[in-house]
Amino acid sequence: MRAAVFGAAGYGGIELVRLLQGHPEVELVYLADPAFEGKRVPEVFPHLTGSVELHFEAPSVPRAVECADVIFFCLHPGIAMDMVAEALDAGRVVLDFSADFRLKDRERYEAYYETHRQPALLSKAVYGLPELHRKALANTRLVAVPGCYPTSGTLALAPLVANGLVDTNCLVVNSASGVSGMGRKPSLPGHFPECNEDARAYGIGIHRHTPEMEQELGRLTSEPLKVLFVPHLIPVSRGIVTTAYAPLRRECTTADLLEAYREFYRGEPFVRVRGESESVSLKPIQGTNYCDVGVRADSRTGMAVALASLDNLGKGLSSAAVQCMNVCCGFDETAGLRQPAIWP
Amino acid sequence: MRAAVFGAAGYGGIELVRLLQGHPEVELVYLADPAFEGKRVPEVFPHLTGSVELHFEAPSVPRAVECADVIFFCLHPGIAMDMVAEALDAGRVVLDFSADFRLKDRERYEAYYETHRQPALLSKAVYGLPELHRKALANTRLVAVPGCYPTSGTLALAPLVANGLVDTNCLVVNSASGVSGMGRKPSLPGHFPECNEDARAYGIGIHRHTPEMEQELGRLTSEPLKVLFVPHLIPVSRGIVTTAYAPLRRECTTADLLEAYREFYRGEPFVRVRGESESVSLKPIQGTNYCDVGVRADSRTGMAVALASLDNLGKGLSSAAVQCMNVCCGFDETAGLRQPAIWP
Amino acid sequence: MRAAVFGAAGYGGIELVRLLQGHPEVELVYLADPAFEGKRVPEVFPHLTGSVELHFEAPSVPRAVECADVIFFCLHPGIAMDMVAEALDAGRVVLDFSADFRLKDRERYEAYYETHRQPALLSKAVYGLPELHRKALANTRLVAVPGCYPTSGTLALAPLVANGLVDTNCLVVNSASGVSGMGRKPSLPGHFPECNEDARAYGIGIHRHTPEMEQELGRLTSEPLKVLFVPHLIPVSRGIVTTAYAPLRRECTTADLLEAYREFYRGEPFVRVRGESESVSLKPIQGTNYCDVGVRADSRTGMAVALASLDNLGKGLSSAAVQCMNVCCGFDETAGLRQPAIWP
Amino acid sequence: MRAAVFGAAGYGGIELVRLLQGHPEVELVYLADPAFEGKRVPEVFPHLTGSVELHFEAPSVPRAVECADVIFFCLHPGIAMDMVAEALDAGRVVLDFSADFRLKDRERYEAYYETHRQPALLSKAVYGLPELHRKALANTRLVAVPGCYPTSGTLALAPLVANGLVDTNCLVVNSASGVSGMGRKPSLPGHFPECNEDARAYGIGIHRHTPEMEQELGRLTSEPLKVLFVPHLIPVSRGIVTTAYAPLRRECTTADLLEAYREFYRGEPFVRVRGESESVSLKPIQGTNYCDVGVRADSRTGMAVALASLDNLGKGLSSAAVQCMNVCCGFDETAGLRQPAIWP
C-alpha cells in the first residue's frame, strides 16, 4: 500500500516515516513539509541516510490523493481539518495526528481548541485506541490518533473504571513527559540548559488532553467521571510515565487488581501488564509501540495506584497510528511494530 | 564554633562540609569516614581543593567530643543511635541526619526501621523543620534532621492542612527525585545507563518517609490524616519536585489558597511562595536551602494541587541541618546559606 | 541457524540477543549468564518481554555445542579463551567479543592483558572488520570482534593511511564515549550523580585499545605507524564520537579527502561518508550498525581531521558481530541490521 | 563600588549578576536588557528571588555612567563597541564580554568578525587573563574578557609553550563544551531532544576563538605558533574540557611537565594543577572561577597531552570578569569568588 505523510518533518512525522520505511506492506510515496521542500530526507534527518531517499515536497492533497492509498496528517490542531475532508472525499484512508477528530463533542473541542470546520466528520472518526475500538477501527476510513497523555492515562485506568473498582468522581492522573512532547520547534522551555537538570508541573488541571481522557474513560462506566490531569516535564528525550490515583470502592489486594488488568488486556499485543514486583518505566518502551501498565492497591489509604509508561512518539503517537492503519487496512496488527526497545 | 562531621564522605556529609567551610561562625575541625581514613578531603572530592584541607579520620566520638562543640551524624538509620547518646552526654549539640530521632512514636519507627536502642531520647529530639518547630529548635541539643521527601511534602501541604482547607483522609503526595537521593554507593538502579533516559515510580505506598509526613502534617490538625506517598526516580542529579493532591473542603480559588500560603510562610527566609503564573521547579533551588512552594485550586474537580521543590541535599538535608544549627546555636538563621542557585 | 550466547546479560550480550531475536536466519537457542541462571530473560530485561522467552542458563560449552551452530562469547578478556577453543574443536562458528584474539602479536597481547593460553588460535582468528577483512571473514570459523574505540579510530583514519595522505608517525585519536562502554556492573565512575554533567579524559596514552588501532591501521601502510589514543567519558548512554588528527603529506582540500573516503568505502553497507557541510554525530547511529565518517583538510595548519561516530554497542560491538556472522555464514551481510536509528 | 550590567539577561549576564550580588565590595545598581525591560529580575530568573530585586531597564550608557563606577557589557561582538568608548570617555571602568577588544591585530579581528569601529581602543584594552596580564590589568580601565575556549586552551598549554617544551608549529586543541556556550536564545542545535544523547565536532579549524589562542600563546614564545582548534558540543549544561596535543621537543616525563606547571601557576588562586593520578573534569569547576589543569608526557609517541577544565560561564566568562574587576579595582583578587563547586 502506498502512503503519504503531511507534516513529515516534525517529531511525530519523522518517527512515522521511520516506521513506514520498515513496514512490510507499505511503500512511502509522498512526504510533505513546507519548511524543507525540495530537500532529501537524509539532509534533514541524517539517521535515515540509506533508508529513505525521498524528497520533502510542498503540501498538496491532490498530489497525495493521486499517488497514495493511505494519508497521514501529522499537523497541529486546526490546520488539516479541510485537507482531511478532501482526502476522505477522494476515498482515501486517513489517519490524523491532531486533536481535531478525537472529541466526539464539538463543544468540548471548541472549548479547548477552536471553531470546528468539519463537524460532520466527528461521528465518522474513530478514536485510535485498538484496545477500546478495534472493531470500529476495522470499519472506518478516518482515524483520530489519540494524544500521548490520554493513551497513557486511559490504558492505566481503563480496567479499574470498566470493572467498577474505583470511584470516578475525581481520577487524578499525574504524568511526566520527555521533552520531545513539545515538538521540534525550538523554544525556551525546551532549550537544553533550561530543561536539563530541571523538572516541573505545568498546565495544572487545564491541559487540553483532559477531555480526551474523560471521554474515553467515561465510555467505560455509566457513572459521572472526572479527571484531574497534571503533566510534568522531565529531562528525557522520549517517554511518558503516568501514575494515577483513585479511591477503591471496596477492599481488594494488588493481586486482585492485577488479575483484572490481565483479564482486560488479555490478547492485546502491545499492552504488557507488569507484576507486583516489577516497575513500569521508560526504558522498556522507548522507540516501540508498547504500553506497560501496572497497578497497586494501598490498603492503608484505600486507594488504587495505576501505572503506565509509553513512548510519546510511539504508542503515544506514531506507532499507534501504524497499529491503527494495520487494523484499518486488514494487515497483521503487529506488522512493522515488532522491534523491541534497545537497552540501555 | 567548632564542628565535627561523621559520615563526611557521603553525599549529605560532603555537602554539609561544603556549607560549613563557608559558614562565618563555624570552623571545621573533624571529619570522619572509615572508607577514606587518612586521605585528604580533596583527594576524594576534588571540588574542595583549595577550600578544605582536613583529612578524613577514623570515627571516634571521644575524639569528636574533645575537639568540637557541634557534631553532625550523617549516617544511615540505626548506625549512630548510641554515638548520638554519647555525644549528648558529653554536652555537645547534635544534629542527626538519619531517621532515628524523627518519629516520636517508637512503634512506628520500629515498624519501618528496627529496634530503637535509645528510646529515651525520642522525646528530647526536635524535628528539624524551623518552619514548624523554630522555638523548640532554639531550646534543644538534639535535632532530627528531616528526610528530603517529608520536607517537600510537609511544606507543600502544611498551609492547606493547618487552615482546614482540605480533607485529610488521604493526602496524595507524588514526588520525583534526582538520583543523588540514593546516596553515593554505586548500585544498578543508579548506574548511569540504567537510570538515564528513564523514569519510574518505586516504593509505592510503602516508602519509609510516609510516617514522617503523617506525623508532621498530623500535628497541624485534629482530624485523622493519612498520606499516600509515591516517589519516582528521574534522571537529574539533585532535586525533588512534589505534586500533592487533596480534596478541597469548600469552594475556593487559587488566589485564596495562595493567600493562605503567603500568610503561613510570611517571614520565612527559605520558603518562597510562587504565584499562579509561576512554576515550581528544580533549577531555582539546586544547591540552596530554598523550598519553593505553590498551589492551585481546580474548581472542575474540587481538588487542591500543592507544589513544592527543594534540593534533596539542600533544604532536604544538609543545608536544612545548617539552618537548624543556626537556630539552635543562636546564629543568624541565614548564616552561610544566602548563596542563590546558579543558572543554568 | 541456531545461536548460543555466553555472557548474555551484559550490555554487549543483551544487545546481541535483541538483534538475534529479530534476525531472519537465526534462532536463539541458548543464553548463558551465571548471575541470572534460571531467570527468564524478561525478568532481567523488561524491554524483551514479548520478544524473548528463553531462560538464562549456567554456562556450559558442551550444552552450547550440542544445541547451537554459532556461538558468541560476550565476556571480558581472558575468561573464555579455552571455551573458544573447545567450541571451535567441536566444529562451531565462534564470535568472541573479548580482546583475546584481536592482536596477532602474542607479546603485545600479553603486554596489555595477560598470558595467552591459546596462542595457536591467534593465526586462525580474523579481525571482525568486514570493511578490511571481508574475504578472510568469509573463510574462518573464529571471529575476533573488534573493540568499540578501535573500530571508530580505524574507520576514521583508514582512507588517509591507505592512500598515503598523512604522516603516520603519530596519529592522534581523541574519542568520547558514552557510559555503557563501562559495562553494566555498577561502579563509582558510572554512578549517575558522578558522571552526569561531567566529562573527562582517562587512560591517556595507555588505553588497551591502542595496539588494536596500530595493528589495523598499520596493515594499510608500509611505514612506521603509531597511535596516541585519548578516550573521554561523556554523559550519554550509548555512542562514541572520534576526532583524529594527522599531518597531511601534501596540500589537499577537504573535497580531495572526501573523494578518497567515498572511494575507500564505496559499496560498504554500513559506513556512511558525511559531506563537508554535514556533522558526524551520535544520534544518527545509536542502536544501529552504522559508522558515520567525515574528514576535513585544514590548510592553515596542514592537518587532516578525521571524524567517526558509531554506537559502542552497535558497530562497536554487538551489531558488528552480527555483520561478521552474516559474512561468515553466507547470509546477506545486512540481514537483521537494516533498522535505522530513532529520532530524537 | 556600584556596578552596571548591559546584556544582563543572557547566560553570561545573569551569572555575573549572581556573582556581583554576593560580592562584598559591589553594589548592583543598573541592569539593562531590552527583552525584559520593566520586569523584575526574579520574574525572569526565579533562582534570584530573594537575592536580587532590581528591574531590567532599557539600555542607556548615560544612565549607567550616571549611577555606576564599573560597567560590564555582556553582548555579542560588534554591538557594544561604541558604548564601550562612551563609557570609557566618561571615566568608567569597563569590562567587555565580547570579542571586540581581545585581538590586538585589527585585521585578524576583521577577518573573523566585522569592521572595527573603535580601533584606537585596541591598544588600551588588556586581555583579561590575570595569569598572563596581572600587572597590565591593574593599570587599565578597559578589560577584554577572554572567550571560554581560549582560556581553557591557553591555560592548558601556556607552561609548555612558555618553557619551550613543545613544537608550536601546530598545537591541536580539542575541546568539548556544554550547551550553555550557545547562549540562551533557543535554536535547533540547542533543543533538548536534538542535543541530548548526542555529541559532535563543529566549526572544525575555523572557529573564531582560534586567533585568540594563537595571540595569547604566541606571546609566550618567539617561534611561529599555530593552533588547530576543534570544539565539540556535549550534553551538559555548563563546562568545557580541553585536551591539547603537542610534540615534545625533548624526552621528558609527566613528572617533569607537572613540575613546570606547578612552577608556572605557583600562587595562582584559581588555577589548580592536578597530579598524574588525578582527573581533570567538569564537576570540580562548575559554578566556580577555577580552571583545573593537568599534563601527561607520552613517551611512546613523544607527545605532550595538556588538559584543562573550566566553567564556560565561570572562569570562561563571568567569574573571570569579576576576577579582572578585582585586580583592576584593587580588591582582594578572590573577593566574591571563593565558593567551591557543589557535589554531585
Image (cartoon, coloured by chain):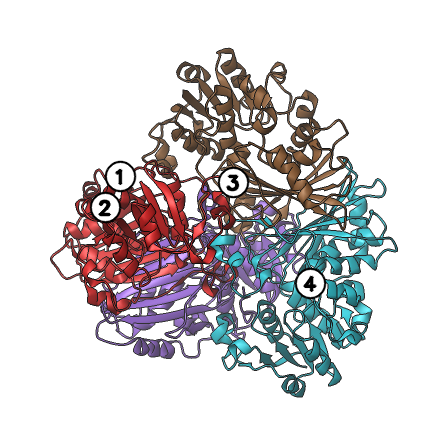
Chain colours: A brown, B cyan, C red, D purple
Residue C279 appears in view: no
Mark 4 secondary-structure assignment: loop
Asked if badge 2 and badge 1 are on a common chain, one would say yes
The number of numbered badges drawn on the structure is 4
- Residue D124 place in picture, x, y as percent: 41, 64
Q: Label 4 vs label 1: CA separation?
A: 56 Å
Whether A180 is drawn above or below D312: the answer is above
| Residue for badge 1 | C333
Q: Which quadrant of the rendered structure holds the N terminus of chain B?
A: bottom right
Q: Amino acid at mark 3?
A: Ser
Q: Residues within 10 Å of mark 2 (few under 14, many from 20)?
A: many
Whether B121 is drawn above or below D31: the answer is below
Tell me the subunit letter for badge 1: C
Between circles 4 and 1, the one closer to the viewer is 1
Q: Residues within 10 Å of mark 4 (few under 14, many from 20)?
A: many
| Residue for badge 3 | A180
Asked if badge 3 and badge 1 are on a common chain, one would say no
| Residue for badge 2 | C130
Q: Label 3 vs label 2: CA separation?
A: 36 Å
Of the numbered discs 2 and 1, the one sitting upstream in the chain is 2
Label number found at residue B147: 4
Asked if badge 2 and badge 4 are on a common chain, one would say no
- Residue D168 place in picture, x, y as percent: 25, 66
Asked if badge 4 and badge 1 are on a common chain, one would say no
